[in-house]
Image (cartoon, coloured by chain):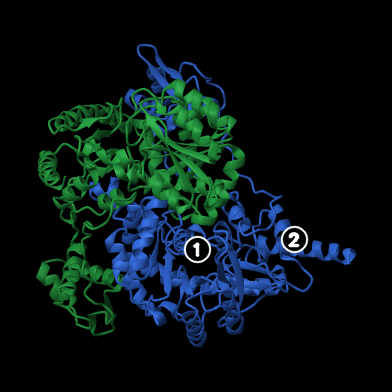
Chain colours: A blue, B green
Amino acid sequence: MENNVKKTKIEIVMQSVREKVANRHLVSGARLPSVRAMAQEFNFSVSTVVEAYERLVTEELIEARAGAGYFVCSSVRAYPLNTVEPCLTREIDPLWISRQSLEAKPNSLKPGCGWMPANWMPEAALRKALRKTSRTEPDGLVSYSTPAGYAPLRHLIARRMEMTGVYSLPEQIILSDSGTQSIDLICRLFLNPGDVVLIDDPCYFNFHALLKVHKVETIAVPFTAQGPDIAAFQAALAKRPRLYITNAGIHNPTGASLSISTAYQILKLAEAAQLIIIEDDIFADLELIPAPRYAALNGFHQVIQIGSFSKTLSASIRCGYIAAKPEWVERLIDLKIATCFNSNHLNTEIIYHALTDSAYRKHLDWLRLHLAEAMSKTAGNLKKLDIHPWLLPKAGMFLWCQLPAGYQADKISKDSLKHGVILAPGGAFSSSPTANQFLRFNVAQSNHKKIYQILEKVLNKQSRAGSTDI
Amino acid sequence: MENNVKKTKIEIVMQSVREKVANRHLVSGARLPSVRAMAQEFNFSVSTVVEAYERLVTEELIEARAGAGYFVCSSVRAYPLNTVEPCLTREIDPLWISRQSLEAKPNSLKPGCGWMPANWMPEAALRKALRKTSRTEPDGLVSYSTPAGYAPLRHLIARRMEMTGVYSLPEQIILSDSGTQSIDLICRLFLNPGDVVLIDDPCYFNFHALLKVHKVETIAVPFTAQGPDIAAFQAALAKRPRLYITNAGIHNPTGASLSISTAYQILKLAEAAQLIIIEDDIFADLELIPAPRYAALNGFHQVIQIGSFSKTLSASIRCGYIAAKPEWVERLIDLKIATCFNSNHLNTEIIYHALTDSAYRKHLDWLRLHLAEAMSKTAGNLKKLDIHPWLLPKAGMFLWCQLPAGYQADKISKDSLKHGVILAPGGAFSSSPTANQFLRFNVAQSNHKKIYQILEKVLNKQSRAGSTDI
């Protein structure tokens, strides 16, 4: 990636020294070429080389000795700049997809990962927002934020929520560093080890990982095309669950949307059981027509909404939020200070500028259109391999797909990984026995012939192995 | 603060509409002035007003109706842009200083807060780093980071550590979003409710708040001018503590530094008891001569180092790290993914650029000099009020000061708050009975006559009240 960046002259000199140290052309304690000699070598000015050397002093790679010149620090060893390799031996668990996707080599194909390719993100709006933020007042640049976070962004989030019929005062909104951190703070407020929490079956794999950290018992309620199975949900209430964690709008991994009648019935049951619903609204900006929200019906009495901007704006500029009733907000702020002290102020300014730039709205129109196209194309490509979506989602980026009878998602995922294709096996989303017949596809990452070639190869291999096994 | 920012024409139009909505000059459903009329009013171009209106549409404050113009969204109520007020009734607890300092009005004086004023921070280096980062490749702008975080910053941190005799491979370093989050992740790895943790008496108040979240028992070991009291430390080991959390280099709040002989004896005891030491190296860049580090002696067998850049670079651009032995690194990465998914990639690039800019090193020289001057000045001012430092620190920004006999730090802090002065009462740092005779002063925030005038007033009032009370 570094080759794409236009290097300044100073950086060229710095890089050259770093490489010489890494290659052991310059070892610990060695004297660097004089500033003048280096300037002649590159045909740069002396002041350029001085600045490069001074920066390397700051990096503690080299040191200046008065009157004697610059020397490689005696403590420097040649660090290998290792690339992270996929771990082929790791068992499929809720962290499998995260680790494989985040540690993927640059040329891997990632139909199983949960985010957009970089060129599907609003790069121009972000660069503009960054430049704007680089001119913010000194306080914005260096100081802590107020405990609840940057007020203009909280106001904007309140207005955005109104699009889905959810009414929150800005004072009810706390900014955090991510959607996951938002849920984690809520779990810290309500849960003790051994408590019971309801989740969807299947659900976003990281809910499993997070709840494991909280040492609670989970009950997975089957998710239908209209929302949670009402009878199963009611039955689960007998175990006195404390929270129910689910997606708002577009369900991950199935792509299903809650129907208004299911929302109404689930909410009535939850209210009667004093169960708190955590609604993760991370996919809101991908919806064409908003699905019903529990918070719209219940008005934050027993519902907490969380969200972030990592799916449609940037995953590199972390920012999430929590909307809850005022008495919970105060306690969540105390927990936020105790466990991470403060959220990122600078990021919240960048996110605010990007969200309010009209380029973002235009980008969303483009994105929804391209996702719809990619969805039908991916479904078509998978159909040829006899892999079929459980349902065709109204919007979003996920297709939850069933393998032909007899194939196992975990084996296919591990085999594909060897060929550089990262899949999302059902077992990471659900511990039910049938989950291993499913794979989640991210349609935005699935437009590569090689994915389907590898899949075909891996399926064929398993079918041959299977016939001898049985 | 907003007045300092040079507003663009588009922003002027947006702000004018926002104010009209907030003041109810424009109510829900009202039609906005036409683009042409607005352009004439401000003497701006029509395209400027169109862009401003379009951005307000994105903010969901107004909506466009084809052929009819722009209207205030029907769901918009006039949100009050409340300023957060200090809470005068809150009891002194470990979160008291954080909440009061973070929620302070812009004109408050904050000798009790734990950070530098904005104009003591390296603003120029940060703005340069931000501009540089705005030109990063698309992946840096929008994508998740690798689980361990941006490699060049991990390499740089490893080199910085070598200044204190601590040798870590970059592979042993994980980036996080803050020093506090780093300790939180470590607590999650090692602690169960009911476990015992050693802390210093006094210690950074947020250690108390964080450990309370983990529902563990704490034993506070008296901190002497050379480090923890060795006999008390040894006695505390009988309760089989799991962790000992302390500062490296400069101790908060006392400003004391660990001596090499104390470090050696404490480490021998810790090794024999299989106690893990968490060393918080957040003040490293303020030291003139590095104090001994446990990690330098022990080499990460039983020591974990954490740190951040919030004290000397920016508290708004959150970034911390953990350095630990490889088998713990893997498990900490899993925990990081489960509880916050990913750290801020963009921030780590900004921090890297700022740290390697030679302007940062020059700033540190300036900062250390000014802190030393402010320290002797603050001590002089306090002496006139018969308030004396427990010791004169070698470096850093804190003075741990004892009140004249009979005065109580909690009462003085609550009284001073009414006059807009935020102090740091000893009770937030320690639950020992004598702690209430102490206040922590941040010398970088203490160069205001008004602070000493208010203190004198509040001390006089208490002395009169005290004489009738007794």
Residue at screen point 30% across, 38% down: B434
Chain label for disc 2: A
Towards the viewer: A335 or A10: A335
Label 2: element kind: helix
Do residues under tags 2 and 1 come within 8 Å of each other at their CB atoms? no
Chain label for disc 1: A
The image shows residue A49, relative to residue A34, as above or below, that is: below
Judge from the rendering whether residue B90 lies leftward or rightward of residue B355; answer left or right: left
Q: Earlier in the sequence, mark 2 or mark 1?
A: 1
Residue A260: numbered disc: none
Q: Which residue is mark 1?
A: A191
**On the rendered image, what quadrant is the C terminus of chain B found in?**
top left
Judge from the rendering whether residue B23 lies leftward or rightward of residue A32; answer left or right: left
Q: How many marks?
A: 2
Residue at screen point 46% across, 34% down: B156
Q: What's the amino acid at mark 1?
A: Leu
- Residue B335 at least partly seen: yes
Can you give x and y, in whole percent of width and height, for residue A162 in the image?
Answer: 34, 77
Q: Which residue is mark 2?
A: A411
Quadrant of res A126: bottom left
Q: What's the amino acid at mark 2?
A: Lys
Towards the viewer: B424 or A147: B424
